[in-house]
Each structure stands twice: as C-alpha cells, then as structure tokens.
C-alpha cells in the first residue's frame, strides 16, 4: 500500500469526480493508496480540512501557513498550537521560505519570522514540520538549525534541490519527499537525489492538484497518481516496486508518529 504524504484535497476540482470527494479517495484506493495527509496553506482552509478528516478517517491534516500566503496580521506559535489540538492534525506546516517571487529583504524577513513561529509550534506540540523551500535552501537550513528543528524533525516536501542539500536536511532529522517532478525527463539532478539518499528517509507525495507526474503532466493531479512517483523511484534505484512502496509507507507512519492505517 501507498501513502500520499502531501496533498491539498480541499483544492482539487471535483468536476472529474462527480463532485464527490469519496470518488477521489476511491480511485486512489484502487491504486493502493491507503492514507492521505491533506496539508494546510492558509488558516481560512483549516475548518474545511477538519471537516474532511472528521468524515474520512484515512485523511490526516496539518496546520500552517505557506510562506507566500499574504496575511494582514502576524502568526504566533500559540495560534498554531491552539489549532493543532485536533487529533487529526499530525503536523505543523506547510511552512518554510520561498524567495522565488519574494525579492524584497523586508518581505523575506516576514517569511523568516513566520517560519520561526512554526518551528516553535512544532517543538511545543511535538508534531513534525512540513517544510517548503524554493530559491531559499541556504536560509531554510540555517533557520532550521538556529531554531533546533532537528529536535522534532519532519519532511522537506516536494523536494527539488541537489544531493548536498538533501543530505544536510537529513542530518537535521528530516525526510525527503518526492513529487511528480522526479518523473520529469529534465529532472536529472533530482533523480540523482532519489538514487542516492538512504531508503529510510524517502517519502512520496502528489502535492495535488499540482505537479501531476508523467504521463499526466499538465493535467490536474490527484492522490491516485502517487503510484507513478513510487514507480519512478523504484526504477531509478533498480529495486522492486512493492518493496519501495512498503518502505515509503512505513517511513510516513514513522515520521508522523502514526499507527499504520487499517482502513
């Protein structure tokens, strides 16, 4: 069985699924996906995520604010901790740093301050971090070290950096999660990361509805397609698909301190 370790179920266009989330999960189940972590990127989404988790026990959720989400008030660790009390909430994030479109020093500093609050919340709640980094790897790792993120660990989601960055993140007690990007023909640097890092630090995800893997690139992504990520990594490593699936699933439950799903 597989786990989609990072998706945004509340953002999926349900037109192709008869306007029914159950059909999304049923199609995923047909591809042997047994559990889903639906990740929060803005606080306005959190009640909807809580409702999904209440209806479907195979869905876990997180609480956090994406670094690019604009807000007119500061986020504090206390605010995140209050929301994280929901037992379906197993992680803090999506958080991190994204300088791709954020170029001003002032805006980048706001991201760093927000990131620090997320790490503090993770340490308080003892819930792992889900970290996003884009064009900001050095600052991301530096801040993680400064705030002692290694004490709680977590996952570098939708990883798209090189092997050195992956190894440094692993040294800080983080898993490396691969999305559909690893199936892209031009993703040779990332494919080398998938070949080289320890098996016990690999997770797989869709980041759906974004980044559909080949051969579905350009179409809406959804959790059933995480199978193609697993197949690509198994092929890159020259190993059996079922073994890779089992390893990544066990890694997920270990990373997020969950008992294995019986759904």
Image (cartoon, rainbow, N blue to C red):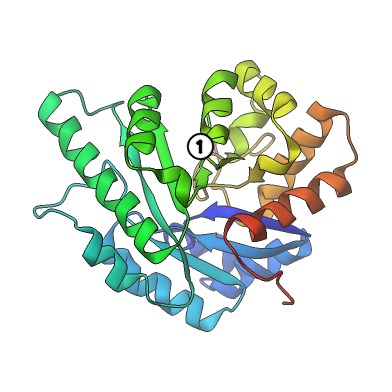
Q: Which residue is outermost to the bottom?
A: 55
Return the x and y of residue 254 as percentages of the image width and height: 65, 58
Secondary structure at badge 1 equals loop
Left-right relation of 170 to 44? right
Q: Residue at x 54, y 73 (%)?
A: 20
- In the shown orientation, is residue 10 left or right of residue 250? left
Name the residue at 61% across, 23% down: 190
Residue hosting label 1: 172
Res 41 quadrant in image: bottom left
Snapshot quadrant of residue 186: top right
When the figure is inspected, residue 149 is found, relative to residue 123, above or below; the finding is above
- When the figure is inspected, residue 173 is found, relative to residue 38, above or below; the finding is above
Going 71% across and 69% down the picture, which residue do you hit? 260
Where is residue 234 drawn, in percent x and y? 81, 36
Residue 186 visible, this angle: no
Q: Residue furthest right?
A: 240
Q: In the figure, residue 98 lies in which quadrant?
A: top left
- Between residue 5 and residue 113, name the one nearer to us: 113
């Amino acid at each position: 069985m597989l786990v989609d370790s990072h998706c945004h179920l509340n953002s999926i266009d349900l037109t192709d699924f008869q306007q029914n989330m159950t059909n999304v999960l049923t199609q995923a189940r047909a591809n042997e996906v047994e559990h889903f972590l639906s990740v929060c990127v803005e606080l306005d989404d959190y009640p909807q995520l809580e409702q999904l988790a209440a209806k479907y026990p195979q869905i876990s959720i997180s609480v956090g604010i994406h670094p690019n989400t604009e807000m007119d008030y500061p986020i504090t660790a206390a605010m995140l901790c209050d929301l994280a009390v929901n037992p379906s909430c197993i992680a803090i994030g999506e958080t991190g740093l994204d300088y791709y479109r954020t170029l001003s020093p002032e805006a980048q500093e706001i991201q760093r301050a927000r990131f620090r609050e997320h790490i503090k919340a993770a340490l308080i709640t003892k819930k792992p971090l889900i970290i996003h980094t884009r064009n900001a790897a050095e600052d991301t790792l530096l801040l993680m070290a400064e705030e002692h993120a290694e004490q709680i660990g977590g996952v570098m989601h939708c990883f798209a950096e090189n092997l050195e960055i992956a190894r440094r993140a692993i040294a800080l007690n983080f898993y490396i999660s691969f999305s559909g990007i690893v199936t892209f023909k031009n993703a040779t640097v990332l494919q080398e990361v998938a070949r080289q890092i320890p098996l016990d630090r690999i997770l797989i995800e869709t980041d759906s509805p974004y980044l559909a893997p080949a051969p579905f690139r350009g179409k809406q992504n959804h959790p059933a397609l995480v199978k193609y990520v697993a197949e690509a990594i198994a092929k890159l490593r020259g190993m059996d698909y079922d073994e890779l699936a089992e390893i990544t699933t066990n890694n997920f439950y270990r990373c997020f301190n969950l008992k294995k799903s019986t759904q």
